[in-house]
Image (spheres, rainbow, N blue to C red):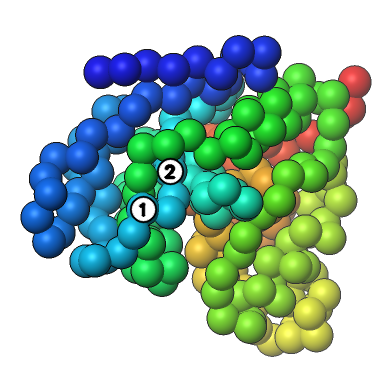
Amino acid sequence: MDKFLLKGRGKFLQEKRVQLLSKNATRRVVPPWRDGAFCQPRGCAPRFCCIALDTPLGRMLAVADSERIYFLGFADCTGTSRAIDRLLLSEQASMGIALAPLFSLLAEELELYFSKKHTEFRLPIAYTGTPFQKEVIAALCKVPYGTTRSYIEQAAMIGRQKACRAVASANALNRLAIIIPCHRIIRQNGDLGGYAGGKERKAWLIQHEKVLE
C-alpha cells in the first residue's frame, strides 16, 4: 500500500492511498486505516478524497473536494463512517484517490490549533443541512475560543429559546469537529453533555482552549 507524507505541512498529516475494490455498479472504497468500506452512490463520478490525520486526540478522518473541507471527525467513533456515507449520498458523489490540495492547509491549521498558536480556522469549509441546522451551526461559530455556552444559551442566540433539544440534535450532526466548535456547548448545570468524539475529548478541548499561551 502506498503511503504519502505531505512535506513541510506538520506532523499530523499522513495520507494513504485508498483501494478501489471493484469496478462493478456499486463501488466501495476501503481506507487502510479502518475496517469496512464507504457506500457510494451508483454511477457518480469521483469527487471527494479522504485522508487520515494523526492528532493529540487520536486519528481523524477528513473529506474534501478541490475547493472545500466537508468532513472532519474521529476515526474510532461509530458514527464517523455513517456520516461520510450520508455525505456521499447527499452530494451524489463518490470517493476518489487523488489528494486534495486543501489537506495541506488543514494539517497546518490543526497543528497551529493544537500548539495554541491560533484560535480560529480560516480554511474554506462546506456545511450542508436544513435551514435550521445551518442556523444552529452559524451560532456555534460565534461562540468565542476559550468560552462555553449552554444549549439554552445557544438556542437563545438563534431566537429559539424553547428549542434547546432540537439545537442539541443539530449540534450532534456537526460534520466538522473542532473546526465548528460544538465542543464549546455544555449543559446549563455545568455538565459536559454529549459529544460525538466522546466526553473525554470534549473535556480535553475545553481545557485546552482555556489558556492561550
187 shown above or below 156: above
Q: Which quarter of the figure has residue 31?
A: top left
Q: Is residue 93 visible?
A: yes
Quadrant containing the N terminus in the rendered view: top left
What is the distance, in whole Å, between disc 1 and disc 2 at their CAs?
8 Å
Residue at 62% of width from left, 51% of height from top? 67
Q: Which mark is residue 154?
A: none
Residue shown at 18%/53% (left/top)?
A: 27
Amino acid tagged 1: Pro
Give coordinates of residue 64: x percent, y percent. Answer: 52, 47
Q: Residue furthest right?
A: 213
Label number found at residue 46: 1
Q: Position of residue 72 (x, y in %)?
A: 53, 45
**Residue in the image at 44% along x and 17% along y:** 4
Q: Nearer the viewer, mark 1 or mark 2?
A: 1
Number of other residues with Cα within 10 Å of mark 1, as a class: few under 14, some 14 to 19, many 20 or more: some
Instruction: Judge whether 3 appears above or below 62 on screen.
Output: above
Q: Are marks 1 and 2 in contact (CB under 8 Å)?
A: yes
Q: In screen coordinates, is 59 left or right of 13?
A: left
